[in-house]
Amino acid sequence: MRLVPIKLNRDNQFIQRIRENDRSVLGDLFRRHQKAIHRYIQRAGGTEAEAEELLQEAIILLWQKVHHGRFYLSTRLHTFLLAVVKYKWNVERHQKRQRWKQQNSSETVEDLLSPEWHPGPQEVQIVQEALEKLAPLCKQLLLLYYFEGRSLRSIARAFHFNSPESVEKRINHCLDQLEEHLNHLLS
């Protein structure tokens, strides 16, 4: 008698339900993985709505792969879904940054936050308004990093991040949000 791990067996049941075209499995998968995906996206600086959208896209991709015979369960479904969410999250952030850079090719947010930037009063007001729209943590991180020149390591220690890399990811997400606010204020 061969023993099958319970989680893998449950995952196989989900795959079988997809093969049987049981659409209720979509909601079951969403509910089962929603908290973990939300936690990951939140730590990466995203919102609950972004997490839900990415999870839905990952579940749809799983559905399509299973129905096209291009899916073989070699790991837990959670691992597969999380990998898809991470990939889509990184692509989305990169695309947002690229769009903003194309629209504002003469100045980037990093340029606006650099000590060498000498803005006029109107520009200062716009950047201040955009900064005020950020979550308090984002605002603090950007001010510490760009205006006070604190290192990623010192910020990680002060705010109990796991590593300087996680601070950098959060700062990048905060820059994305700042870019969106600036675009809104400038449009």
Image (cartoon, rainbow, N blue to C red):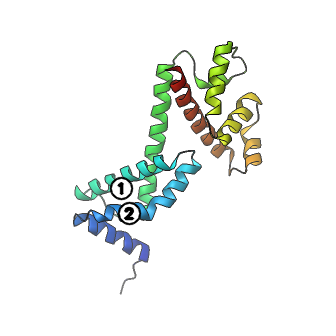
Q: What residue appears at the point 60 percent right and 37 percent down from the top-left corner?
A: 174
Q: Evaluate if marks 1 and 2 touch, with contact meaning CB atoms under 8 Å apart.
A: yes
Which residue is painted at 49% across and 25% down in the image?
100
Residue located 27% across and 53% down the image: 64
Determine which of the numbered discs, if any, sits on residue 59 in the image.
Answer: 1
Q: How many marks?
A: 2
Q: Nearer the viewer, residue 15 or 141?
A: 141
Label 2: state its secondary structure.
helix
Amino acid type shown at disc 2: Leu
Residue 39: give x, y in percent of width and height: 55, 55
Secondary structure of the residue carrying tag 1 is: helix
Tag 1: amino acid: Ile
Q: CA distance from mark 1 to mark 2?
A: 7 Å
Of label 1 and label 2, which has the lower sequence position? 2
Which residue was labeled with disc 2? 29
Q: Is residue 86 visible?
A: no
| Residue 182 lies in quadrant | top right
Q: Residue 99, how many percent across, how many down?
A: 45, 26
Q: Is residue 27 visible?
A: yes
Looking at the image, residue 55 lies above or below residue 128: below
In what quadrant of the picture does the N terminus appear?
Answer: bottom left
The location of residue 37, given as percent across then percent down, is: 49, 56
36 lies left or right of 142: left
Q: Residue at x 42, y 63 (%)?
A: 31
- Residue count near mark 1 (Cα–Cα under 10 Å), binned few <14, some 14–19, many ≥20: many
